[in-house]
Image (spheres, rainbow, N blue to C red):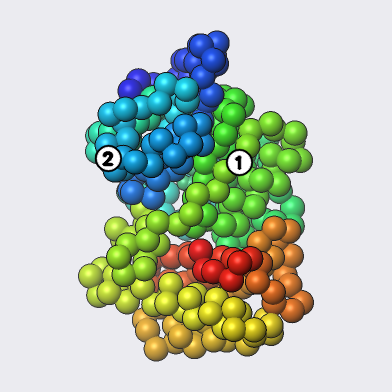
């Protein structure tokens, strides 16, 4: 695995990979990697090699990396997407550990730019604002957050020019924002969503889980339990928006988690459905102490929870 801080080097190496007939796949991250990130790398490999990569364990994928895809992972804690009162400074970082994990997962190129490399003239004067999709839910609690995300992802896509870019479904609104941005700006990269990876007790994997005290960590699975209860009710035929949101909130109410929002959206067009159907996503954000967690559940169109 090669490591670089420099945009020019990424451009050179991705151009070379394309000239060799390889597809380029991008996995953008903010580091402090966990199995969820590694599942994005595995998905990047599988998108080219079909079921081939699935036969190996996550940690063994790199051993037989498929040469038809060139996987670039970026690690960049993007200051533009953090509000002034947010956790940019204390966001967990461990580059040495990330390097080992990325290499064993089969990343070909690790791009770890500095803030100066990404924003050479200071705060970016050009910002990408995706209206509507960025509004409400996390966008309401974190003003400017999705503008920061869309701007940095657009830069990463322009730097790497990947065939595909892989994002976790856990950040569902982010995924919708990035899809809309790519469509509106005619960016040809296919934006691929990868299912949420969960701990054994249901908590969605996230770099921020490290902030949870042991007591809050024990309580955190209530968020997924509540989402499952909401999804089950939709699957049982409940069509009323407020009833489902109340059910999810009630399930969390006895715990230490403070709900910020529970919302339901159409999975495809992100509209708030008048009456619920079985192609919706239920989303929530909640705080356990100082830690803000988000999670969601897709109610599948064949009646399953994803
Ligand atoms: O999901 C994340 O880790 C970040 O928002 C992303 C997409 C890498 C942009 O900084």
Q: Residue at x 32, y 35 (%)?
A: 61
In the rendered structure, the answer to whether residue 275 lies left or right of residue 196 reads right
Q: Assess mark 2: CB under 8 A from ligand 1?
A: no
- Please provide percent x and percent y for residue 256: 36, 81
| Rendering coords of residue 272 (x, y %) | 72, 70
**Label 1 sits on residue:** 191
Reading the chain from its start, which is encountered first: label 2 or label 1?
2
What residue is drawn where x is 33% and y is 23%? 1
Q: Position of residue 113 (x, y in %)?
A: 43, 28
Q: Quadrant of residue 161?
A: top right
Front residue (pair 47, 130): 47
Q: Is residue 58 above or below residue 281?
A: above
Q: CA distance from mark 2 to mark 1?
A: 24 Å
Q: Where is 295 relative to 171, above or below?
A: below
| Mark 2 and mark 1 residues within 8 Å of each other at the beta carbon | no
As drawn, 258 above or below 269: below
Secondary structure at numbered mark 2: helix
Toward which corner of the image does residue 87 lie, by quadrant? bottom left
The residue sitting at 52% across, 68% down in the picture is 305
Q: Secondary structure at mark 1?
A: strand
The residue wearing badge 2 is: 59
- As drawn, the label of residue 175 is none
- Residue at x 31%, y 27% (from the top left corner): 64
Asked whether residue 219 appears in the rendered view, the answer is yes
Q: Position of residue 79 (x, y in %)?
A: 49, 43
């Amino acid at each position: 695995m090669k490591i670089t801080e420099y945009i020019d080097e990424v451009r050179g190496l991705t151009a070379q990979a394309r000239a060799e007939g390889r597809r380029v796949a991008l996995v953008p991250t903010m580091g402090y990697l966990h199995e969820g990130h590694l599942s994005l790398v595995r998905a990047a490999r599988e998108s080219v090699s079909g079921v081939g990569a699935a036969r190996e364990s996550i940690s063994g994928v790199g051993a037989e990396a498929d040469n038809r895809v060139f996987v670039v992972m970026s690690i960049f804690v993007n200051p533009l997407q953090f509000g002034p009162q947010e956790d940019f400074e204390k966001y967990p970082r461990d580059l040495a550990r990330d390097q080992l994990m990325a290499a064993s997962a089969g990343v070909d190129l690790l791009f770890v730019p500095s803030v100066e490399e990404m924003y050479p003239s200071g705060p970016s004067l050009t910002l990408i604002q995706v209206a509507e999709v960025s509004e409400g839910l996390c966008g309401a609690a974190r003003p400017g957050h999705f503008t920061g995300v869309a701007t940095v992802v657009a830069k990463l896509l322009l730097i790497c020019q990947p065939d595909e870019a892989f994002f976790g479904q856990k950040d569902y609104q982010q995924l919708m924002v990035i899809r809309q941005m790519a469509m509106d700006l005619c960016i040809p990269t296919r934006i691929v969503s990868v299912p949420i990876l969960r701990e054994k007790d249901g908590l969605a994997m996230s770099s921020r889980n490290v902030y949870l005290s042991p007591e809050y960590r024990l309580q955190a699975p209530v968020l997924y339990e509540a989402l499952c209860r909401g999804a089950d009710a939709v699957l049982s035929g409940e069509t009323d928006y407020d009833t489902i949101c109340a059910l999810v909130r009630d399930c969390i109410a006895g715990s230490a988690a403070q709900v910020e929002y529970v919302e339901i959206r159409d999975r495809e067009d992100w509209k708030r459905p008048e009456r619920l159907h079985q192609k919706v996503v239920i989303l929530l954000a909640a705080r356990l102490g100082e830690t803000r967690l988000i999670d969601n559940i897709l109610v599948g169109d064949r009646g399953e929870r994803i």
